[in-house]
Image: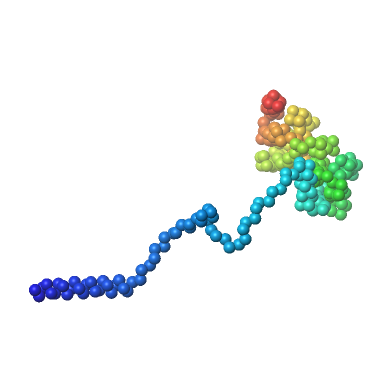
Amino acid sequence: MDVDKDTLCSAGAAAASKDDDADSFTKVKSKKTQKRKRGPDGADMDTDGPAATKRPQFPPISGDRLRVNRRVHECLSQGPDEMRKVAVPAHRYTPLKENWLKIFTPIVENLQLQVRFNLKTRNVEIKTCKDTQDIASLTKATDFVKAFVLGFQVEDALALLRLDELFLESFDVTDVKPLKGDHLSRAIGRVAGKGGKTKFTIENVTKTRIVLAETKVHILGSFQNIKMARTAICNLILGSPPSKVYGNIRVVASRTAERF
């Protein structure tokens, strides 16, 4: 009996200690995400502000009005007057002076731009005015003057004003192959040919214009034709014989003509 009494006492003490431990700890609510309940009208949340206004309905705009608005936006974004400058090197002063009337006339009469040669800064400055209708004509005029400064004839450079798909590309002979001294001179001679024969042949086959100025090569033409002329010139710089280059560009030119 004494053993049973001791057992009961120990069990009661254990139960009392458990109750004390339970009282000493506070229960923490579980942090379960509670989904937001949707209202009867399907709204996710209640807003205290004013009711949302209806989306405005605008009538469709005509094409002419849209073009006018776009042109006005371009003029406002470009500012009242925009000016571009083209630096003129010393060896192009005389040709610029002799051909100034041929350069001045199409820029002013056809593109409605203002142009002048600044004697202090030695730059050709081209600026828009109130009569300018298309802001893109400023870029065309800049490319036209830049082509003449690089060494192209005025008649060839005028094509940049008449056609939209003509580009200028320039690269150095040493970009293709790092040459020095006589090796560089021979590479330039291979590109030019005897009396300029090789250069003229590449121009006629690829329908481009090429200017060799010391170690610089400038090409004027369409994107595909510039690519053909550049490939032929690079092969000549790397040492390919002219006859092989002629054959390659003729094959490529014939394939391009058949494609189009």
Which residue sits at x=38%, y=67%? 28
Up the image or down, 146 lies above or below 24; here it is: above
Q: Nearer the viewer, residue 7 or 213?
A: 7
The residue at the far front in this view is 40
The residue at the far left in this view is 1
Image quarter in which the N terminus is found = bottom left
Up the image or down, 138 lies above or below 200; here it is: below
* Residue 136 position in % (x across, y down): 78, 44
* Residue 72 position in % (x across, y down): 79, 49
Up the image or down, 54 lies above or below 210; here it is: below
Image quarter in which the C terminus is found = top right
Would residue 238 appear left or right of 94 to someone viewing this image? Answer: left
* Residue 117 position in % (x across, y down): 87, 49
Q: Nearer the viewer, residue 216 or 209?
A: 209
* Residue 127 position in % (x across, y down): 84, 49
Q: Nearer the viewer, residue 234 or 177?
A: 234
